[in-house]
Image (cartoon, rainbow, N blue to C red):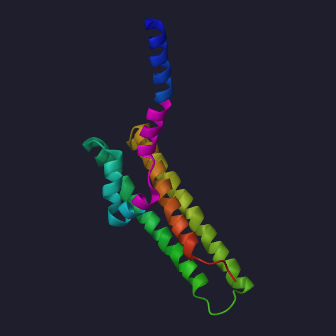
Amino acid sequence: MRKPFTALMLCVAIAAAPLALAQTKLDDVTDLQALRQAVKNDKRAYVESTLKLTDAEGKRFWPIYNAYQREVDLNNRRRNVALQELMFRDSAMSNLAAKHYVAELLAVDEAEIKARRTMRNRVMRALPAVKAARYMRLEEKIRAVQDYDEASVVPLAR
């Protein structure tokens, strides 16, 4: 009687383990609406609460974070200027204006990649690899939300 009961309990435990693991993973997945609101309220506080840095890690990390955020802000302003030129045109876009628009957006993308690469290299030296990877993924999620918001309001060139 004891062996079948033990086997049954083992089967239940094995079946329930993925569900418990999935719940833990689901808790860690960021709700994009909540992420959008947290970043809007105070991105630095959100990053701080997510990374849970020690004092020593924070002293190394925050100057890197601040420098990267300045680069992100600069690139966002450049992107916004280009997008406003697209959105607020009174007439159809000329070929010359389209070439300028595309060249500017590519330049912004390249600047973002360069800033991200520099930040990644510095963060990987400043933090344990797991925390560095967590921060990199957090920045990617924030950028994805921003890209989605941009795509939802910016029309195609006409």
Q: Main secondary structure of the magenta part?
A: helix
Residue 48: image x %, image y %? 32, 51
Q: Quadrant of the N terminus?
A: top left
Q: What residue is rendered at 50% in x and 20% in y?
A: 11
Residue lying furthest right in this view?
A: 95
Q: What residue is rendered at 65% in x and 73% in y?
A: 103
Residue 156: image x %, image y %? 66, 77
Q: Left or right of 115: which side holds 110?
A: right
Q: What residue is rendered at 52% in x and 59% in y?
A: 144
Q: Quadrant of the C terminus?
A: bottom right
Is 31 included in the stretch rendered in magenta?
Answer: yes
Q: Quadrant of residue 85 in the image?
A: bottom right
Q: Left or right of 50: which side holds 76?
A: right
Which residue is more in the foreground, 156 or 9?
Answer: 9
| Magenta segment boundaries in residue numbering | 18-35
Q: What residue is rendered at 66% in x and 79% in y?
A: 100
Q: Quadrant of residue 73 in the image?
A: bottom left
Residue 153: image x %, image y %? 55, 76
